[in-house]
Amino acid sequence: MVKLDIQKKGELVGYIDGAGDVIPESLEQIGYKVIRIDPNELNAASLAKFDAIVLGIRAYNTLDILKFKQAELLKYVENGGTLISQYNTNRGLVLDNIAPYKLELSRDRVTEEDAKVEFLNPQHPVLNSPNKITQKDFENWVQERGLYFSDSWAPEFTPILEMNDSNEASSKGSLLIAKYGKGHYIYTGLSFFRQFPDAVPGAFRLFTNLISVGE
């Protein structure tokens, strides 16, 4: 049991299963209503009711149907929705570009769970609302910071964090956010799927801010 100081905006989250994680159950524990979505039935109209859509880890590696349904997801974003894409490997993607703008994935990762995290855009809403994110939120992470970060992206994306392993080059591609139409597209390689089972408070607070960014 963990006492968690957390605020949230929005109530209804759609989730599309990828390779498997505990994101839906974890979000339900902090008060969200999570509905699993059959990717074969994706259309922008049916997605409009959701405050955010979350793609499970490696969804763009494992779900061939997304090559045909990506346009519906992006239309949802364009109409004002928030789409959160968790990490995908850079090999075996089912489509050439997983984002509305150029976004290239790499093998960059940070394996030291206590690696220092720099805030590149400390005034960005995702670090301030509804939870004020501080260095304390990156304490007690487990196993790693993240993996398969982006190493090249279009200027429409805003990098939020910078981090690196000891004696390694720093990476700014762990959390990228872009406005697209009225909504937001988010790519993150941060290992929320590892932090949630261990009830890491800062991971919950940051993920809640991702969901809330368009609210």
Image (cartoon, rainbow, N blue to C red):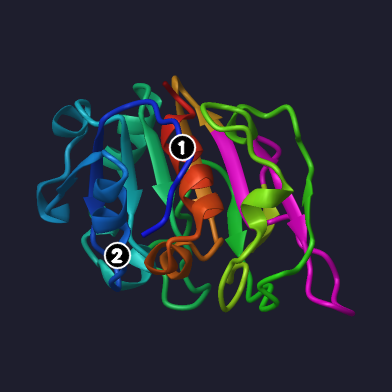
In which quadrant is the N terminus drawn? bottom left
State whether residue 21 is above or below residue 162.
below
Name the kind of residue labelled 1 in the image: Ile
Residue closest to the eye, 186 or 24: 24
Residue closest to the eye, 205 or 62: 205
Q: Judge whether residue 201 is colored magenta.
A: no
Residue 149 position by quadrant: bottom right
Name the kind of residue labelled 2 in the image: Val
Between the C-alphas of marks 2 and 1, the distance is: 19 Å
In the rendering, which numbered label is found on residue 6?
1
Q: Which residues are magenta?
A: 154-178
In which quadrant is the C terminus drawn? top left
Residue 196, percent across and down?
41, 62
The residue where tag 2 is placed is 22
Residue 199 position by quadrant: bottom left
Neighbor class of circle 1 (other Cα within 10 Å; few <14, some 14-19, many 20+) is some
Residue 85, percent across and down?
43, 52
